[in-house]
Amino acid sequence: MASPDVTPVVSVADLRSALDLLLTEVERQHGPDVDLAEGVYWTVSPGEAYRFDDAPPKVTVGDLVDDVESVRELLSRDPDEGVYVWHDLAHVVGVLTRLAALDLPRET
């Protein structure tokens, strides 16, 4: 675990490059269209994920169908309507988390 005195900073360029590498590998393994094979999943809202107090975060249910539709809507949205990072990124994270789950080693 990192030192609590160190503030994590990420370069957007590094993050973009890492995602490109990862998505290239996903495409190599699964092809250009990935069957996510599931519908719903457990999630914690971004607002609660980084709050550490006496109460545990509220777990909610995410929906991959909604996530995929939201990603498509983002890509077709008129730029004048805006990009809502907190909302749009949460849907992308849902899809990325499922891609990570698909790559987990299978239990024997």
Image (cartoon, rainbow, N blue to C red):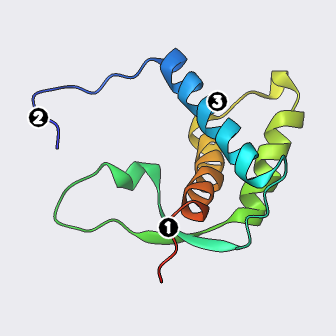
Residue 22 occupies which quadrant of the picture?
top right
**x, y (%) of residue 60?**
51, 71
Spatial distance from mark 2 to mark 1, Cα to Cα?
30 Å
User: What residue does disc 2 label?
Assistant: 3
Mark 2: secondary structure = loop
Disc 2 and disc 1 in contact, CB within 8 angstroms: no
Residue drawn where x is 79% and y is 63% of the image: 35
**x, y (%) of residue 19?**
59, 33
Mark 3: secondary structure = helix
> Mark 1 or mark 3, which is nearer to you?
1
> Mark 2 or mark 3, which is nearer to you?
3
> Mark 2 or mark 1, which is nearer to you?
1
2 or 1: tag closer to the N-terminus: 2
Position of 57 relative to 15 (above/below): below
Q: Amino acid at mark 2?
A: Ser
Instruction: Judge from the rendering whether residue 20 lies leftward or rightward of residue 76; answer left or right.
Output: left
**x, y (%) of residue 99?**
62, 56
Residue drawn where x is 65% and y is 54% of the image: 95
Residue 58 occupies which quadrant of the picture?
bottom left
Residue drawn where x is 64% and y is 29% of the image: 20
1 or 3: tag closer to the N-terminus: 3
Q: Which mark is residue 63?
A: none
User: What residue does disc 1 label?
Assistant: 105
Instruction: Judge from the rendering whether residue 73 lies leftward or rightward of residue 15; answer left or right.
Output: right
Position of 58 relative to 48 (above/below): below
Spatial distance from mark 1 to mark 3, Cα to Cα?
22 Å
Residue drawn where x is 65% and y is 73% of the image: 40
Q: Amino acid at mark 1?
A: Pro
2 or 3: tag closer to the N-terminus: 2
User: What residue does disc 3 label?
Assistant: 20
Q: Amino acid at mark 3?
A: Asp
Residue 62 occupies which quadrant of the picture?
bottom right
